[in-house]
Image (cartoon, grey):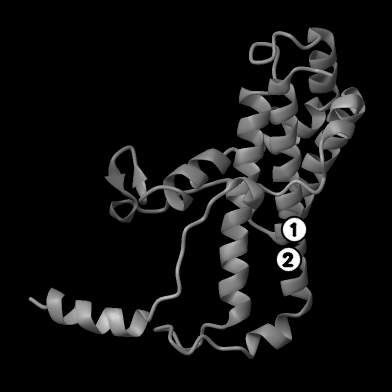
Amino acid sequence: MENEKLRNTLKTMFHLQTQIHLTIESLNEIERNQKILENIKLDNFFDKSFNLKRSAGAILANYSIILFCSFLDEYHNFFNVYELPEVDKEIILKVKKKNKAGIKRINKWSGLLAFRNQLLVHNFRIKNESFFSKENIEYKIPNTLSEKNLLSGIIYIICLNIGEAFPMVISSLNSRDRMVDNLNLIGEEIDNEMELELLLNEMKY
């Protein structure tokens, strides 16, 4: 079997690809059921015209960008001959060459990383300046559903090519492995309304 570092890198990319597929298929279902979801309002939201179609669609669209970038980070930064020196160099280079056309198409969305970093995972800062202090900021990203479907499809093909190059490693991955099985998530049921009321009294100014 190839080394454990390669195994974990492939597991990471394939797990991300699965999450991407789930997210994009959820967006497709939202689009197919938009009439139903538009009738479900968010009662506690300040904009009473807001509905479940808009909110769920926007949240998943943003999350898809995070997943796309995470996959590309793993592919470029860890699936290479420098990070995997014990793996046959020619195999990795051959896979990278096969995937070149897909990566070239992805690179046309030149604002992906900036959009992810500045607006989705950090605090609306562009080089330490507030996003809200700027005007007409442009990001070239997969913003339409058709673009997201394309990018998801490209990532799927990339994973197919990787799987073809490392069949023994892929066959050793347990598809039933779940991230949650390796996590100890600590949470508890609370009376949030009661706590908020108490805190509101304590935090009055």
Tell me: 185 left or right of 193. Answer: right
Picture coordinates of residue 29, whole percent (x, y): 77, 71
Picture coordinates of residue 86, whole percent (x, y): 73, 9
Helix or strand or loop: what does disc 1 sit on? helix
Picture coordinates of residue 165, whole percent (x, y): 89, 23
Residue 145 seen from this side:
yes
Above or below for 34 versus 110: below
Density class for disc 1 (Cα within 10 Å; few <14, some 14-19, many ≥20) is: some
Nearer to me, 133 or 119? 119
Q: Which mark is residue 87?
A: none
Helix or strand or loop: what does disc 2 sit on? helix
Q: Is there a contact, CB below 8 Å, between mark 1 and mark 2?
A: yes
The residue wearing badge 2 is 26
The residue wearing badge 1 is 22
**Residue 188 sits in which quadrant?**
bottom left
User: What amino acid is at disc 2?
Assistant: Ser
Picture coordinates of residue 42, whole percent (x, y): 51, 85
User: What amino acid is at disc 1?
Assistant: Leu
What's the residue at 33%, 37% (across, down)? 127
Residue sticking out furthest to the left = 205
Above or below for 78 versus 11: above
